[in-house]
Image (spheres, rainbow, N blue to C red):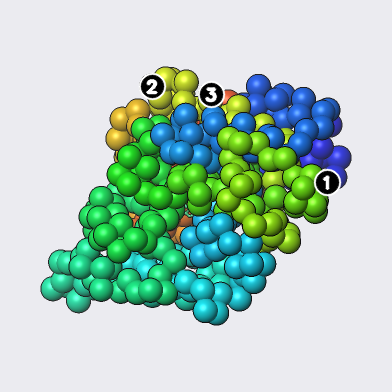
C-alpha cells in the first residue's frame, strides 16, 4: 500500500504535464533518494544556500543564485531585493514600500495570475503598451520606448515575462532599463526546455531570473531558482533566511554574503514564508544537475513513445483524429485529439470532464477545449498509463456516438 492509499487519497493519471494543480511531475528516483538522505543530516542553511549559489552561478552564468520555494516565491523575493537592496531598514519595512521604490513597470500583455507575487512585495504595477489584437486591425504590442517613458525615480524594476511571443525582445528592454539604472526581473518559470534558456536570459542582460524547480527540471514540486546579480540575490537571501542571531556571531558564507557592506541584520523578512528546507535545496540541485547533463533527445524519445501508447487504442476508432505536435527535442511533444461535437454529440470539455470523473481519474491539458482539442502531455505519465488514456478517450467518443444514435 502506498502513502496515498493509506490515507484514502486516490492517485490520478496525469496527462497534463507538470501543473501545480495536479501535483507536478514524477521525481526521478535518484533525486528522491538525495532528498531522503538530506533528511538525515543537519546543516547551516546559509552555508547550504551559499553552496547552492556557486552551483546555480555555474549553471546559469549568473553571479549568484538561491533555491526558493518556487518561481512565484522567486518573483516576490526578487522584487523585494530590487526595492530594498542591501538596506536592512527597508527590508524590515516591507511590504510597506511607501517612500521606497514602489513601482514595477510591466508590459500590459504580460500581466498574468503569477504577478500577484510581485505585488506582494508592496509595489504597484505600472502597465505599458497595448496588444492591439482583438480589434482585428491591430498588429503591435508594447515598444521599448514605452517602457523607458514609464520608468521614474520610483521604479524598483521592470518585470519581464519570458515567452516565445513576448514583446519587445528582452535585450531591448534591458537596454532602456539599464540606461536608467533600473534592473530587469525575468519570470522564466516555465521556459525550460530548452536547457539553454538556463543561461539565455542572464546572457541577454537580465538582472534576476526566476525558474520553477517543479516543472521540466523535475525537482521538488515546491522549489524554484532565483539567479542573477550578486547584490540582488544576496538581498533576496537576507529577506528569506532566518537571522535570529547577533550581528557579531553571524558568520555567513562569503560565496553569497558581504557582511562588511551591511550595517546590521534585518528581522525575519518578507520572504520568510517562502522558506525552503534542506531537502528542497538538495533535491533541486541534484535534479538541476541531472537536467543539464541529460541528452534532451532521450527525454524526447521517451515522451514520443508514451504518446504512441496513447494513440494505439484510438487507432481503431473511425473518425477519431489526432495530430502529434512535435517541435523537436527542445520541446515537449503534445498529442492533440480532435473532438467534433457533430460526430458524437460530445464537446471537448465534456470528454475532458468524463476523463476526470472516471476511475482512475485522468487529467488532460484542457487549454485547447474551446477549439475542440483534448491535449495529452506525456511528461508526467507512468509506463502503461498512456494506453489507459487512449482507451478511455476512445470509449468516451464511442459512447458519445452510441448515445446519439
Ligand atoms: C508556473 C509559473 C510560475 C510559478 O511557478 P512555481 O514554481 O509554481 O511557483 C510563475 N510564472 C509563470 C509564467 C509560470 O508558468
- Are dots 1 and 3 in contact, CB under 8 Å? no
Q: Position of residue 314 (x, y in %)?
A: 43, 35
Quick one: SS at disc 3?
A: helix
The vertical placement of 230 against 254, above or below, is below
Above or below — where is 111 with respect to 404?
below
Across and down, in percent, residue 26 comes to 61, 34
The Cα atoms of the two marked residues, 2 and 1, are separated by: 38 Å
**Residue 166 relative to residue 346: left or right:** left
Instruction: From the viewer's side, name the closer residue of 183 and 188.
Output: 183
Circle 1 residues within 10 Å: few <14, some 14–19, many ≥20: few
Crowding at mark 2 (Cα within 10 Å: few <14, some 14-19, many 20+): few
Mark 1 sits on what residue?
8
Please state which of the two labelled residues, at mark 1 or mark 3, is closer to the viewer. Answer: 3
Distance of label 2 from label 3 (alpha carbons): 14 Å
* Label 3, residues with CA under 10 Å away: few <14, some 14-19, many ≥20: some
Comparing labels 2 and 3, the label whose residue is closer to the camera: 3
Measured Cα–Cα span from mark 1 to mark 3? 33 Å
Image: 261 above or below 121 = above
Is the shortest distance between ligand 1 and the CB of mark 1 under 8 Å? Answer: no
**What's the residue at 47%, 71% (across, down)?**
101
Q: Say which quadrant the C terminus sits in.
A: bottom left
Residue 290: numbered disc: 3
Q: Is residue 350 left or right of residue 168?
A: right
Residue 74 location (% of width, % of height):
55, 52
Q: Nearer the viewer, mark 2 or mark 1?
A: 2
- Front residue of 176 and 288: 176
**Which residue is labeled 2 in the image?**
297
**Residue 281 x/y as whole percent:** 66, 37
Residue at 72%, 35% in the rendered image: 279
Name which residue lies at 41% across and 44% down: 191
> Residue at the right extreme?
6
User: Which of 297 and 371 lies nearest the eye of the viewer?
Assistant: 297
Amino acid at each position: 500500500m502506498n502513502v496515498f492509499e493509506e490515507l484514502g487519497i486516490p492517485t490520478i493519471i496525469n496527462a497534463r504535464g507538470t501543473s501545480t494543480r495536479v501535483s507536478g511531475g514524477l521525481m526521478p528516483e535518484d533525486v528522491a533518494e538525495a532528498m531522503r538522505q538530506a533528511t538525515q543530516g543537519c546543516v547551516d542553511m546559509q552555508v547550504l544556500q551559499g553552496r547552492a549559489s556557486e552551483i546555480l552561478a555555474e549553471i546559469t552564468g549568473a553571479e549568484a543564485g538561491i533555491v526558493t520555494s518556487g518561481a512565484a516565491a522567486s518573483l516576490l523575493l526578487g522584487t523585494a531585493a530590487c526595492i530594498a537592496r542591501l538596506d536592512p531598514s527597508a527590508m524590515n519595512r516591507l511590504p510597506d514600500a511607501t517612500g521606497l521604490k514602489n513601482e514595477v513597470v510591466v508590459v500590459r500583455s504580460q500581466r498574468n495570475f503569477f504577478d500577484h507575487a510581485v505585488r506582494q512585495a508592496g509595489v504597484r504595477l505600472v502597465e505599458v503598451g497595448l496588444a492591439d489584437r482583438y480589434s482585428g486591425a491591430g498588429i503591435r504590442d508594447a515598444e521599448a520606448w514605452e517602457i523607458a517613458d514609464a520608468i521614474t525615480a520610483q521604479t524598483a524594476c521592470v518585470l519581464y515575462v519570458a515567452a516565445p511571443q513576448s514583446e519587445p525582445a528582452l535585450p531591448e528592454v534591458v537596454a532602456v532599463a539599464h540606461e536608467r539604472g533600473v534592473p530587469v526581473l525575468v519570470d522564466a518559470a516555465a521556459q525550460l526546455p530548452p536547457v539553454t534558456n538556463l543561461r539565455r536570459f542572464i546572457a541577454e542582460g537580465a538582472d534576476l531570473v526566476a525558474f520553477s524547480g517543479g516543472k521540466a527540471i523535475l525537482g521538488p514540486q515546491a522549489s524554484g531558482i532565483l539567479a542573477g546579480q550578486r547584490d540582488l540575490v544576496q538581498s533576496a537571501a537576507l529577506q528569506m533566511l532566518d537571522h535570529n542571531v547577533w550581528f557579531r556571531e553571524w558568520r555567513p558564507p562569503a560565496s553569497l554574503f558581504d557582511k562588511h557592506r551591511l550595517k546590521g541584520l534585518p528581522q525575519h523578512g518578507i520572504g520568510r514564508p517562502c522558506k525552503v528546507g534542506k531537502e528542497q535545496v538538495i533535491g533541486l540541485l541534484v535534479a538541476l544537475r541531472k537536467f543539464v547533463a541529460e541528452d534532451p533527445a532521450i527525454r524526447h524519445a521517451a515522451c514520443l513513445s508514451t504518446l504512441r501508447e496513447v494513440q494505439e487504442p484510438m487507432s481503431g476508432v473511425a473518425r477519431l483524429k489526432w495530430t502529434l505536435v512535435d517541435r523537436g527535442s527542445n520541446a515537449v511533444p503534445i498529442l492533440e485529439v480532435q473532438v467534433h461535437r457533430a460526430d458524437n454529440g460530445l464537446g471537448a470539455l465534456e470528454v475532458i470532464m468524463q476523463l476526470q470523473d472516471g476511475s482512475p481519474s485522468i487529467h488532460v491539458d484542457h487549454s485547447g477545449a474551446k477549439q475542440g482539442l483534448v491535449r495529452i502531455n506525456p511528461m508526467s505519465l507512468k509506463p502503461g498509463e498512456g494506453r489507459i488514456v487512449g482507451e478511455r478517450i476512445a470509449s468516451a467518443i464511442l459512447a458519445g456516438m452510441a448515445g446519439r444514435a
